[in-house]
Image: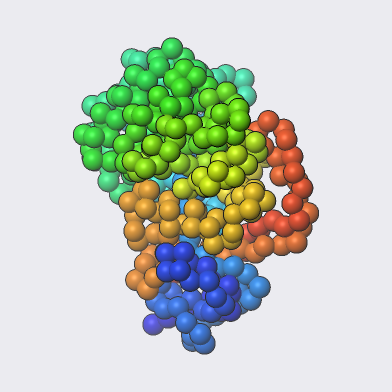
Amino acid sequence: MTDLVLKGGRVIDPSQGLDRVTDVAFADGRVEAIGDNLSGPARDATGCIVTPGLIDLHTHVYWGGTSLGVDADAYGRQSAVTTCVDTGSAGPGNFPGFQSHVIARAQTRILAYLNISFAGIYGFSSTITVGEAQDMRLMAVREAAAMARANPDSIIGIKVRIGKNAGGTSGLAPLDLALDAADRCGLPLMCHIDEAPPTYGETLDRLRPGDVLTHAFRPFPNAPVLADGTIRPAVHLARARGVLFDIGHGMGSFSWSTARAMLAAGFAPDTISSDVHALCINGPAWDLLRTMTKFFALGMTLPQVIAATTMAPARAIRRPDLGSLKPGAIGDASVIALKSVPTILEDVLGETIAHPERLVPKGRVMAGIWHD
């Protein structure tokens, strides 16, 4: 029996090549059907865009457990996100608390890349910044692999943060250990990169097919493009090998100049994510919808941006039941609108551009149930 029908919205589902005004029905927590004039308890979506449940591939939602965490449900309502992928807030030493106190209690689905650091990201605030990969004693290869194997429903990969800020003088060693743990439990890896060392190219050379480089459109120094706007050869080689490039906007990792150069060269991101946390939720990242709007301003189409926040992240985390409105898929949908609202869009360096439109949230469907 049909539980809910979203009526008359512009349904954009890149997993099916679908972009038209129609209805979407849900039953028993799953997508029941897509078609015209479907019957059942209805919610009017006229003038709105209906997408598969938006997946924010880079968030920090261990609220109360880490200083950078934000509340997943409040954030989900703000951004129409149905799945938050937490990227390394917790490590094997504190993941059980994350699981019990946050993941299990949230309405919003939370999946996690487990930090290779035993303590996760423990020293990140406006006054204290201690990179967890600076101390090699915290690199918990055995413990991370064991924790990931014990929690397959929640842990979808291993996370490592490297670079001068996150890793100090540790170089590539934390990445090598994280890859070892990921190999042991058969999961993909997400790698954060900040300023060198190590370099952008050295980092990419280590990554395997299906691994994700986040902060991929970061500013100089250690950017993916050279001074003349050409893309580093290692970037092309990595994509050809199957490495995925994620935005991970955050407070320091999205530059208009880098993004313009990458897109001008035909290199779009595989996934678009916010890297929302306590220090960027009030700017410059704000949320996933604001980050998506920035890519409209850069010339990507609405279906392309939605693919990068639904189908593509679902593939990256190996969850084919998400990111699609195919009948039988998990009954998640995001209802958003593209409003003619002049908006100032900023990058992490303070450069701003004006854009005449902005994506805004209208509601979410999670497991076939409507949430305002």
- Depth check, front residue: 371 or 218: 218
- Asked if residue 343 lies left or right of residue 10, the reply is right
In the rendered image, residue 15, in percent from the top left (x then y), is placed at: 42, 64
Which color scheme did the rendering employ for the protein? rainbow
273 versus 91 height, above or below? below
Residue at far left of view: 184
- Residue 78 visible (yes or no): no
- Depth check, front residue: 227 or 349: 227
The residue lying at 74 percent from left, 51 percent from top is 355
- Depth check, front residue: 78 or 237: 237
- Asked if residue 144 lies left or right of residue 198, the reply is left
102 versus 28 height, above or below? above
- Depth check, front residue: 272 or 80: 272
The residue lying at 44 percent from left, 20 percent from top is 198
Q: Quadrant of the C terminus?
A: bottom right
In the rendered image, residue 305, in percent from the top left (x then y), is placed at: 55, 55
In the rendered image, residue 132, in percent from the top left (x then y), is placed at: 43, 21
202 versus 296 height, above or below? above
Name which quarter of the figure residue 149 lies in: top left
The residue lying at 61 percent from left, 30 percent from top is 228
- Residue 6 visible (yes or no): yes
